[in-house]
């Protein structure tokens, strides 16, 4: 399957405390630097699952841009239609995690993606509509997301990213003429912001509820799937892997099959110290 993934690619700086995190104090622990971003992580997971993936993003300016771009190409992700932004633009995500791997908080500086305007996407519409599935995170502007909703021909999956970014999806639906897309993926906090989207027609809504598993709303029905048993090392990247598994299952997959695929990938991700686990390529889903 060919998948086009649109959104953020950045440097991840992940700090994990060695004991219970103390706010306002210096906490001993470990710090890891890796390549990340919601869209890039989803693309990486899909590539590991065997899909043909194209990433559409604007890499932040500075010395890291070409390194992130090269890392994508090394794992088979096409970046032919990507750009590198001028110096002074950033794509960084700094996260702080408790000793149990749960996120305490984070800061995202993703101003490079603001350049992904409707006209920027329109220049790449042939690549977008040549894909069997399209995934977009909410790092793009509301205007760009609205344009994508109206012009994407294939099944479109939107990822809310965070509560602050989820507002962009609400705004995009309000701006959109079509107001219809295939699937929305969010966590419980993001869902509170997006549970009511007037006029929106969404085939499936996937809501990650952490250790409780996954809720799916589809055609007036609600489904609940428990999380798979696992030893959590870090939660960062679990949601990206979840959506990758759902997308990989295909838009024609049953709710049960798509949920199972997503939860299998999420389990691999949270058991790894990295946002993307190489173990995902061993899954048979």
Image: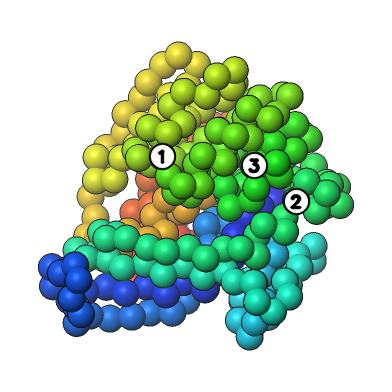
Give coordinates of residue 243: x percent, y percent: 49, 46
Give coordinates of residue 96: x percent, y percent: 31, 68
Q: Earlier in the sequence, mark 2 or mark 1?
A: 2
Which residue sits at x=52%, y=57%?
A: 38
Give coordinates of residue 98: x percent, y percent: 21, 65
Crowd band around label 3 with a 10 angstrom C-alpha radius: few (<14), some (14–19), many (20+): many
Q: Is residue 216 visible?
A: yes
Q: Which residue is mark 1?
A: 190
Residue closest to the far top: 220
Crowd band around label 1 with a 10 angstrom C-alpha radius: few (<14), some (14–19), many (20+): many
Q: Quarter-wise, where is residue 95 in the image?
A: bottom left
Residue closest to the far bottom: 63
Q: Is residue 53 visible?
A: no
Q: Quarter-wise, where is residue 10 in the image?
A: bottom right
Which residue sits at x=73%, y=75%?
A: 86
Q: Distance between the Cα atoms at labels 2 and 1?
A: 23 Å
Q: What mark, if any, has residue 2 been given in the picture?
A: none
Given this view, does label 1 or label 3 mark the residue nearer the observer? 3
Q: Which residue is mark 3?
A: 142
Most foreground residue, 47 or 118 = 118
Which residue sits at x=31%, y=40%?
A: 209
Q: Distance between the Cα atoms at labels 3 and 2?
A: 9 Å
Q: Quarter-wise, where is residue 236 in the image?
A: bottom left
Contact? badges 1 and 3 (CB < 8 Å)? no
Q: Secondary structure at mark 3?
A: helix
Q: Secondary structure at mark 2?
A: loop
Q: Secondary structure at mark 1?
A: helix
Q: Earlier in the sequence, mark 3 or mark 2?
A: 2
Crowd band around label 2 with a 10 angstrom C-alpha radius: few (<14), some (14–19), many (20+): some
Q: Which residue is mark 2?
A: 117
């Amino acid at each position: 399957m060919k998948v086009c993934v649109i959104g953020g690619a950045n440097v991840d700086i992940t700090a994990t405390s060695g004991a219970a995190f103390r706010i306002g104090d210096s906490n001993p622990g470990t710090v890891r630097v890796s390549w990340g971003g919601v869209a890039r992580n989803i693309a990486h997971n899909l590539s590991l699952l065997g899909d043909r993936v194209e990433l559409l993003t604007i890499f932040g300016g500075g010395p890291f841009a070409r390194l992130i771009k090269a890392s994508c190409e090394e794992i088979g992700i096409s970046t032919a239609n990507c750009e590198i932004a001028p110096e002074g633009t950033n794509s960084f995500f700094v996260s702080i995690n408790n000793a149990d791997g749960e996120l305490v908080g984070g800061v995202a500086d993703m101003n490079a993606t603001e350049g992904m305007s409707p006209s920027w996407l329109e220049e790449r519409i042939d690549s977008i509509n040549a894909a069997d599935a399209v995934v977009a995170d909410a790092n793009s502007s509301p205007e760009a997301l609205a344009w994508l909703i109206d012009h994407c021909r294939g099944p479109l999956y939107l990822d809310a990213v965070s509560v602050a970014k989820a507002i962009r999806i609400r705004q995009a639906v309000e701006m959109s003429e079509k107001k219809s897309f295939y699937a929305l993926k969010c966590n419980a906090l993001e869902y509170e912001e997006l549970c009511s989207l007037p006029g929106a027609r969404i085939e499936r809504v996937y809501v990650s509820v952490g250790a409780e598993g996954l809720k799916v709303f589809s055609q007036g029905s609600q489904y609940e799937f428990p999380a798979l048993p696992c030893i959590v090392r870090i939660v960062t990247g679990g949601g990206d892997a979840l959506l990758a598994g759902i997308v990989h299952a295909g838009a024609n997959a049953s709710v049960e099959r798509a949920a199972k695929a997503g939860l299998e990938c999420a389990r691999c991700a949270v058991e790894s110290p990295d946002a993307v686990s190489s173990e995902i390529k061993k899954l048979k889903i």
